[in-house]
Image (cartoon, grey):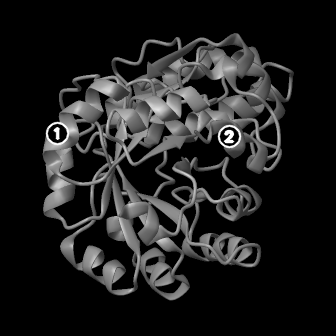
């Protein structure tokens, strides 16, 4: 059984939220019997190594390290210029100038040999993939290191690719989930299946399923288990954990309870708190992750003057139900 292989006593995975998950959070969840996670997509290999070692210093349990397997962005100079021109009035509102160009700051795992080598050396115990899968050679190397391997799927076609790649389990990411949609093809059709529908659709894949999306309470976790999942992955519930790296404005924004999907922040569909930037027309957004570079600069300029409506405040549906506390306490509240 997947949970026994990982060493989990509690059927709850703390989602690997890049920029939010800290070593203290991952370790606290792992020590309390769940699967703690780090999201290292925004880090280079050496920074990720430091965080992994910081987790290992606080727990002997396996924990999860998540990497992004997105395709490199297709560059379109005119589209990128138009996007920056569209943001110029927002920058001007805060006396700042928009960047001259968009840049890509997230290296795909397929191109990051240093990250692969680091994972093979540090052996966190679990490695998960988002936005697709690495090549067979990388999968084989990680398996040889002893890692349990997980992949995210939002539809059956992607789940079957995860099975064909020989992974151990599937994170079934429902439409309600906060953060980035895990579609392998960012521009492909999206069935927008909600979590329970998705669990039903993915049973054909024949791998253990971890339910994700809109899971905020013990009752939600139990419903996912009753629907066939072996565990539930919770991100939004842990955003307000004492150990999380969530900013104060992000925590405060959750209370509004309204979320929406948007490409306007990063160039890929992602669910976050409804605010100024998430409400922007995203129909002509450049490819992921190019818009991020401008958004981060705009958010910094606005925040310096007390305006937090440009924050990339990822959250799933039901975010207003998130209850603060220590990570172990939150995990206890989620445990059936």
Query: Along the line of sight, which residue is nearer the eye, 37 or 313?
Result: 37
Is 90 above or below relative to 65?
above
Q: In this figure, which residue is indicated by the disc labeled 2?
A: 238
Q: Dot 2, how many residues are within 10 Å of its Cα: few (below 14), some (14-19), or many (20+)? A: many
Q: Quadrant of the C terminus?
A: top right
Residue 58 lies left or right of residue 180; in this view the side is: right
Residue 65 percent location from the top left of the image:
52, 64
Q: In this figure, which residue is indicated by the disc labeled 1?
A: 156
Is 279 above or below relative to 50?
above
Q: Quadrant of the N terminus?
A: bottom left
Residue 232 lies left or right of residue 10; in this view the side is: left
**Element at badge 1?**
helix
Residue 180 percent location from the top left of the image:
44, 37
Q: Is residue 280 visible?
A: yes
Q: Is residue 100 visible?
A: no
**Residue at point 47%, 75% (across, down):** 115
Q: Dot 1, how many residues are within 10 Å of its Cα: few (below 14), some (14-19), or many (20+)? A: some
Residue 215 percent location from the top left of the image:
52, 30
Query: Along the line of sight, which residue is nearer the eye, 319 or 47?
Result: 319
Label 2, label 1: how far apart the Cα atoms are: 28 Å
**Residue at point 18%, 27% (across, down):** 189
**Residue at point 36%, 79% (across, down):** 142
Residue 305 percent location from the top left of the image:
86, 22
Query: Along the line of sight, which residue is nearer the eye, 7 or 73?
Result: 7
């Amino acid at each position: 059984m997947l949970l026994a292989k990982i060493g989990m006593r509690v059927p709850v995975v703390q989602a690997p939220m890049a920029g939010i998950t800290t070593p203290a959070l991952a370790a606290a969840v792992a020590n309390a019997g769940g699967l703690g996670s780090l999201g290292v997509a925004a880090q280079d290999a050496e920074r990720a190594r430091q965080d992994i070692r910081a987790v290992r210093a606080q727990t002997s349990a396996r924990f999860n390290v998540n990497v992004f397997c997105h395709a490199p962005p297709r560059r379109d100079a005119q589209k990128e210029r138009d996007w920056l021109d569209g943001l110029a009035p927002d920058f001007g509102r805060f006396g700042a100038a928009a960047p001259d160009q968009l840049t890509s700051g997230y290296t795909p795992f397929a191109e990051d040999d240093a990250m692969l080598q680091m994972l093979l050396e540090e052996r966190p115990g679990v490695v998960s993939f988002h936005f697709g899968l690495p090549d067979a050679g990388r999968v084989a190397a990680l398996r040889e290191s002893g890692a349990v391997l997980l992949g995210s799927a939002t539809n059956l076609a992607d789940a079957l690719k995860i099975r064909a790649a020989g992974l151990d389990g599937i994170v079934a990411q429902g439409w309600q989930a906060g953060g980035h949609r895990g579609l392998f093809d960012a521009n492909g059709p999206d069935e927008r299946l909600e979590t329970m529908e998705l669990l039903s659709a993915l049973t054909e894949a024949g791998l253990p399923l971890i339910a994700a999306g809109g899971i905020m309470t013990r009752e939600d976790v139990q419903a996912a288990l009753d629907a066939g999942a072996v565990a539930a992955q919770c991100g939004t519930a842990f955003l307000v954990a004492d150990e999380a790296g969530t900013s104060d404005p992000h925590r405060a924004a959750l209370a509004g309870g309204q979320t929406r999907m948007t490409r306007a922040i990063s160039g890929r569909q992602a669910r976050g708190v409804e605010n100024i930037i998430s409400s922007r027309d995203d129909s002509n957004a450049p490819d992921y992750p190019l818009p991020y570079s401008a958004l981060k600069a705009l958010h910094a300029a606005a925040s310096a003057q007390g305006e937090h409506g440009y924050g990339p405040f990822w959250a799933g549906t039901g975010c207003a139900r998130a209850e603060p506390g220590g990570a172990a306490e939150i995990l206890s509240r989620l445990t059936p």
